[in-house]
Image (cartoon, rainbow, N blue to C red):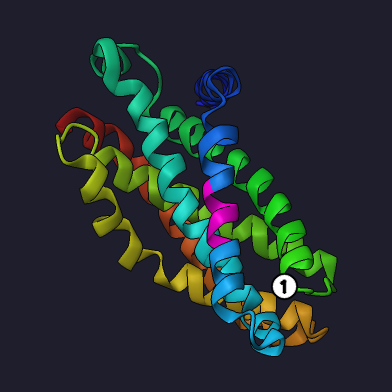
Amino acid sequence: MWADAGLVAGKDLRIELRSRVGVNQVVPFSLVVLVLFAFALNPDRGVLDRAAPGLFWVAVLLSSLLATQRSFAVEAADGNRDGLRMSGLDPAGLFLGKAAAVAAQLLLLEALLLVGITVLYGTTLRSFGLLALTCLLATVGLAGAGTVYGVMAFGLRVRETLLPLLVLPVLAPVLLAATRSFEAALAGAAGEATSWLGLLTAFAVLYVVVGLFGFGPLLEES
């Protein structure tokens, strides 16, 4: 399973590195989202600073949809979908590999967006350990859930519009918990983030387990 996961993740990351879709589309999209919020709330810098955690995770959430769609779009061309089914790779390894590739891209994006909110919103970053832990747990949840619902919409012609409808309501707990944990970190009140970190952990574990056992059947039915 782990060997297959490494193969799939390496393949997806090499495709993204060579195509530069992430650099040319996903990163500019997320930065544009931050800039638009900055324009909208610029008259009151205090509101902008207080809203920074929520705006950060909204940008990450929307970008995760693009990354997930891209992850399965590369399998939809030239009969790759059937090749993926008949490859003999462990379905759990397929899930872990595709989710890991999406997660790696999101973590890099989050690092850039942290710089973005400090420049655009004047946010002062504190409690770097809590920020890093929040990003890691939330990213695992986003990548896991996105991969599960991405394979559900894999074989449908309307997958580009169906995926957001499936995923966005499910990811509401991640958006809420990650935002509250970020707020606690930026306020220097790490103790207030404990329950939110627990929610992020539970969500991440839930969708990793669902993906490990359900990815194969969902792929066969897609």
Rendering coords of residue 222 (x, y %): 18, 33
Q: Does the magenta stretch include residue 33?
A: yes
Amino acid tagged 1: Tyr
- Report whether 109 appears left or right of 95: right
Residue 209 visible, this orientation: no
Image quadrant assignment for residue 159: top left
Determine whether the residue tagged by mark 1 lies in a helix, strand or loop.
loop
Q: Is residue 194 magenta?
A: no
Query: Where does label 1 land, which residue?
Result: 121
As displayed, is residue 147 above or below residue 49?
A: above
Rendering coords of residue 87 (x, y %): 34, 11
As displayed, is residue 60 above or below residue 99?
A: below
- Report whether 86 appears left or right of 137: left
Count of numbered tags = 1
At x 53%, y 73%, the residue is 199
As displayed, is residue 21 above or below residue 189?
A: above
Image quadrant assignment for residue 216: top left
At x 72%, y 72%, the residue is 121
The residue lying toward the viewer, choosing from 17 and 212, is 17
Residue interval drawn in magenta: 29-34
At x 72%, y 83%, the residue is 184
- Report whether 80 appears left or right of 92: left
The residue lying toward the viewer, choosing from 108 and 116, is 116
Rendering coords of residue 20 (x, y %): 57, 25
Rendering coords of residue 208 (x, y %): 46, 49
- Report whether 144 appears left or right of 43: left
Tell me the crowding category of disc 1: few under 14, some 14 to 19, or many 20 or more residues within 10 angstroms, Cα based. many
Residue 3 visible, this orientation: yes
Image quadrant assignment for residue 54: bottom right
Our reading of the magenta stretch's main secondary structure is helix
As displayed, is residue 150 above or below residue 48?
A: above
